Image (cartoon, rainbow, N blue to C red):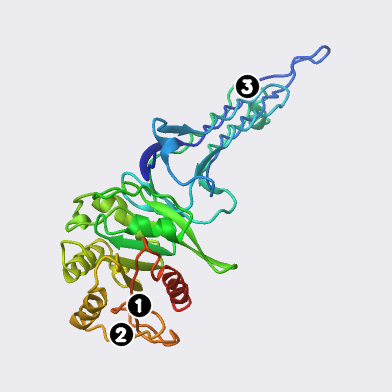
Amino acid sequence: MFVDCVEIFVSSGKGGEGAVSFRREKFVINGGPDGGDGGKGGNVYFQVDRNTDTLSHFRGHKHFKAQNGRPGEGRNKSGKKGEDLIIVVPPGTQVFDSQSGDLLLDLLDETQKILFLEGGKGGLGNVHFKNATNQRPIYAQKGLPGVEKTIRLELKLIADVGLVGFPNVGKSTLVSVLSNAKPEIANYEFTTLIPSLGIVNVGDYQSFVIADIPGIIGGASEGKGLGIEFLRHIERTRFLLFVLDLVNYRTLDEQFDILRLEVSKFSKKLENRPFGIMFSKSDATEDAANLIESFIKDKNFGLKKNVEIPQCYTQEENFDTKYDVIKPLFVLGVSSASNVNVESLKHLLNAAFKRI
């Protein structure tokens, strides 16, 4: 089961108590204090693991606590340090304070362990409190408590391209053709209920990651449909690909305007993200070329027609100049079913990454 948001309680370990002890040996009269120190409580760490891609293992397991430090012992023996707790999460996980809502950690790369909560310090044994006026101290320090915190984990997928479109416009079919991913495909809306990632190979040595999220409808940024639950998964994408359906009951203008509005309402950063437009099911109507050309003129994008790729328009033919953020880098008609312009789409996306 795919889970991308959970709330958990975490606590570092408490420090062990210092010992109150005195030497008791044969031929040693009135032996002095020899109480050892308590052990330090275990720390809490976060570690990114690329072998996991969901937070589902946190379901039904809400409390995570590092081990307490062991108390000190006689003969100046220090208590054992408590075992550290390592919480393993997928890349792209953010850690929020549940009470304040503050972002505490943003876990992206698979690096070394990141310390989150420090364990409590162990208490000093009575051996530390011996002095000239107190030869027989009968007290020791308590260990310091661990740190407790209720946190919210949110997973935001890390991808190069995020697909944005209404339900049942062909996003999942496109991902299955472009990449090694196998999302569920059916002829009804909201087939895709969870986000999925696929790796798209471009030639022998280049590749990029594409993210398919459930279809967006009007009001998605306010929670309608699957809405905001999955919109956050395209926040980290470098490039947005709007997928418009040529045979949808909605007009192309309506589809694009609603999608842009919902993305803008959800995140101003996403609004300024470089984007392209793909028209799906281009083989399902004989009027595809005219529909695409009319759409570009109506939107006043001012794109140039690519003479080498059918139904393709770009800001600049050679992709060498700086792009205009309010216009698509390219517009392309594609048919995943009959493999029309699929390879061209790969290369256009790959070329776009070199400009952003």
Residue closest to the eye, 48 or 112 = 48
> Is 126 drawn above or below residue 187 in the view shown?
above
Residue sitting at 24 percent across and 59 percent down? 166
Residue closest to the eye, 203 or 147 = 203
Residue sitting at 47 percent across and 72 percent down? 350
Amino acid type, residue under disc 1 in the picture? Phe
Residue sitting at 18 percent across and 71 percent down? 253
Q: Residue furthest front?
A: 286
CB-based contact (under 8 Å), mark 3 and mark 1: no
Mark earlier in primary sequence (1, 2): 2
Q: Position of residue 192 (x, y in %)?
A: 32, 49
Q: Position of residue 259 (x, y in %)?
A: 23, 64
Q: Is residue 92 left or right of residue 206?
A: left
Q: Position of residue 223 (x, y in %)?
A: 20, 51
**Mark 1 closeness class: few <14, some 14–19, many ≥20 residues within 10 Å:** many
Tell me the quarter of the image containing the N terminus: top left
Whether residue 288 is visible, yes or no, is yes
Amino acid type, residue under disc 3 in the picture? Val
Q: Which mark is residue 330?
A: 1
Of tags 3 and 1, the one toward the viewer is: 1
Amino acid type, residue under disc 2 in the picture? Leu
CB-based contact (under 8 Å), mark 2 and mark 3: no
Q: Which mark is residue 303?
A: 2
